[in-house]
Image (cartoon, rainbow, N blue to C red):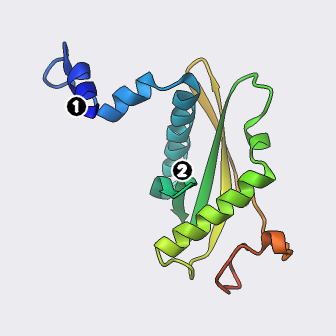
Amino acid sequence: MLNFLRRFTELGRGQNEKPSAAAALRRSAPASARTGSAGEEAAAELLSRMGWTILARNWRSRHLELDIVAEERGVLVFVEVKTRAHGSLQSPHEALTPVKQERLGRAAQAWLDAHHAWERPCRFDLVCVTSRQGTYHTELIRNVIEYGDQSPRHSLGRRDTSWQPW
């Protein structure tokens, strides 16, 4: 399938103009997926302009996903990106439900396990992206998830590192 897409998108193009198969798949994706991908790209650009180091994008472990894992001044930042069209009924920050927050915590655990990074300080941030006629407005909200509550619902860690947000 990818070879077909690659050959199909290369037909009629100049030698210097060869889009990737991923670009062809993005163009054929539903509008909501294209909007989400563009929002994640805008968020990554924002963080890079702020001097953050992007460590991973769309990192997956089984059914868990982290949109962006970044580093800011030695702190790991798990960044959730929520993109909505201007005038949407739900704002981007309203889409970060308690269930989604719990899944992000489990995904962060998986990332820390996979990278042997339990000793690193970390936090959860949210980038809200609003799209309007092909332009994207980004807003960063720091420390969007607080795990100071030590109730069983929030004791996510299998590690006993006191600084961790859970």
Picture quarter with the N terminus: top left
Q: Is residue 74 visible?
A: no
Above or below, 37 against 7 in this view is below
In this rendering, the label closer to the viewer, 1 or 2: 1
Q: Quadrant of residue 23?
A: top left
Q: Element at badge 2?
A: helix
Residue visible at 75% across and 60% down in the picture: 145
Q: Element at badge 1?
A: helix
Q: CA distance from mark 1 to mark 2?
A: 34 Å
x and y percentages locating residue 99 in the rendered image: 76, 53
Q: Is residue 1 visible?
A: yes
Q: Quadrant of residue 101?
A: bottom right
- Residue reaching furthest to the left: 15
- The amino acid beneath tag 1 is Asn
Above or below, 49 against 163 in this view is above
Q: Quadrant of residue 125?
A: bottom right
Above or below, 150 against 84 in this view is below
**Label 2: how many residues lie within 10 Å, few (<14), some (14-19) or many (20+)?**
some
Q: Circle 1 is placed at which residue position?
A: 3
x and y percentages locating residue 162 in the rendered image: 71, 85
Q: Circle 2 is placed at which residue position?
A: 47
x and y percentages locating residue 91 in the rendered image: 77, 34
Question: For this rendering, which residue is in front, 28 or 145?
Answer: 28
